[in-house]
Amino acid sequence: MAYDLIVIGSGPGGYVCAIRAAQLGLKTAVVEKDKTFGGTCLNVGCIPSKALLHASELFEEAGHVFAKMGIGVGTPKLDLPAMMKFKDEGVDGNVKGVAFLFKKNKVDSFQGTGRVAAAGKVEVKGADGKTQVLETKNIVIATGSDVARLRGITIDEKRVVSSTGALTLDKVPQKLLVVGAGVIGLELGSVWRRLGAEVTVVEFLDRILPGMDSEVCRQFQRILEKQGVTFKLAAKVTAIDTSGNRLKASVEPAAGGAAETIEADVALVAIGRVPFTDGLGLKEAGVALDNRNRVQVDAHFATNVKGIYAIGDVIAGPMLAHKAEDEGVAVAEILAGQAGHVNYDVIPNVVYTYPEIASVGKSEEELKAAGVAYNTGKFPFTANGRAKVNLQTEGFVKILADAKTDRVLGVHIVGPDAGNMIAEAAVAMEFGAAAEDIARTCHAHPTLTEAVKEAALAVGKRAIHI
Ligand SMILES: Cc1cc2nc3c(=O)[nH]c(=O)nc-3n(C[C@H](O)[C@H](O)[C@H](O)COP(=O)(O)OP(=O)(O)OC[C@H]3O[C@@H](n4cnc5c(N)ncnc54)[C@H](O)[C@@H]3O)c2cc1C
């Protein structure tokens, strides 16, 4: 028996699982089909998108905010190839970091496409077509997800792009059409708007960011509109004519009706992602999928076939890197005989636009639907000293707490640095905190986090600064 564990896929689910398993003494290997480790997240997802969001945010600040603070830099000039190089170097550093961690933890790695030949056997097919079969006690499938496509619309990654193409455009499109007002569409739409594109977002539903607290989404949409993004909600793109110099997209009301044409230089199709199981041999191995083609697992990440487990984007749940990582740790601990576990009630969700949107726990809609009585505490950044002095007053913190017990059920933040601030709420919720606990915790002054404390005070109707 060669290995205790073979992980197929080296994204945040797979590589974290392999490292944790090796820490726990399991003889572990990873199979990865791409040239670099790190999966979607490090190569074409979280990391490159955040690099471009960071750089484009500073570009916009240099152009619009610096002068107000007495910093004269003139009109900033965009050097897009240099910005792309900055992004690529960031990706390179991160993927090399994973290779280093594999070596450090004595995780073996195999480059090639992995296929479950049978329980206990993984076949690896290299780029040269040669195959080898590895033996293992357990297999973890961590093959992630792929871009969801629109029927009849071909993604060429040049003019009609997925998120992957939108991270490598070689010039700023004059007009960018974004199909889908989810996280990826709004983040990458923000990048290209800041760099000079006119951005129109078409969304099938009548709201942006489906699934997030609707008050947050309404305010966020107004903020993005003020920044110059145009929204066409309750509408669908049915075709994109690529024959001319400009793309011509047919857009119809979601409920049906007359189509209009929207012209664009680039169209970004960002309607979501689908689990990736191509070539894995799951059907032959008898591994059950659910009705959305995700690998079906039980509460211990086990599939219906003994010795085969699955984690991350390829199973149900939010398609987020930190969810995949936590599942990777949990399944490794379970395989080592420990009590690995993921608390799905406390998984933060962040949109890295400006301002950022961050939430954890339940939305108001979810609490209403479940018939849970709750109190709301809200505090706007216009009343936070640090936000005021930094000229960053858009947004608010909203805390939802159980009406009877005061236990925090959900926290929603629209505001600068919301993605970092939500960690406090996640820790509080993990410890079963009441709003009162947050309200009585001393928060440093002057920080944006004081708005979290004030929102907690506002649950008991006793905020100080408003
Ligand atoms: C543009 C973009 C931005 C994003 N931003 C964020 C963000 O800010 N925060 C966040 O939490 N999430 C973000 N995500 C989502 C995040 O990337 C995913 O949730 C995360 O990567 C899922 O991890 P995973 O390990 O399940 O799969 P993946 O990261 O998709 O990794 C799967 C790996 O498996 C490999 N593989 C597949 N099949 C085989 C096979 N048969 N043999 C060998 N290898 C195989 C693939 O090559 C890949 O390397 C973003 C996604 C995109 C596209």
Image (cartoon, grey):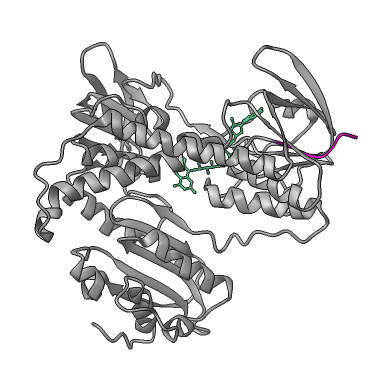
The structure residue drawn at horizontal position 70% and vertical position 55%, both measured from the top left corner, is 330
Q: Residue 288 at what x, y percent from top left?
A: 73, 36
Quadrant holding the N terminus? top right
Viewer-closest of 287 and 290? 287
Q: Does residue 341 appear in the picture of this structure? A: yes
- Residue at 30 percent across and 68 percent down: it is 396
Q: Quadrant of ligand 1?
A: top right
Give the magenta part as a residue range: 1-7
Q: Position of residue 196 (x, y in %)?
A: 18, 36
Above or below: residue 451 compared with residue 294: below
The reply, left or right, for residue 34 in relation to residue 31 is left
Farthest residue toward the right? 1
Q: Quadrant of residue 377?
A: bottom left
When the figure is inspected, residue 309 is found, relative to residue 459, above or below; the finding is above
The total of numbered circles placed on residues is 0
User: Could you say where residue 110 lies in the image, as x and y percent from the top left?
Assistant: 70, 28
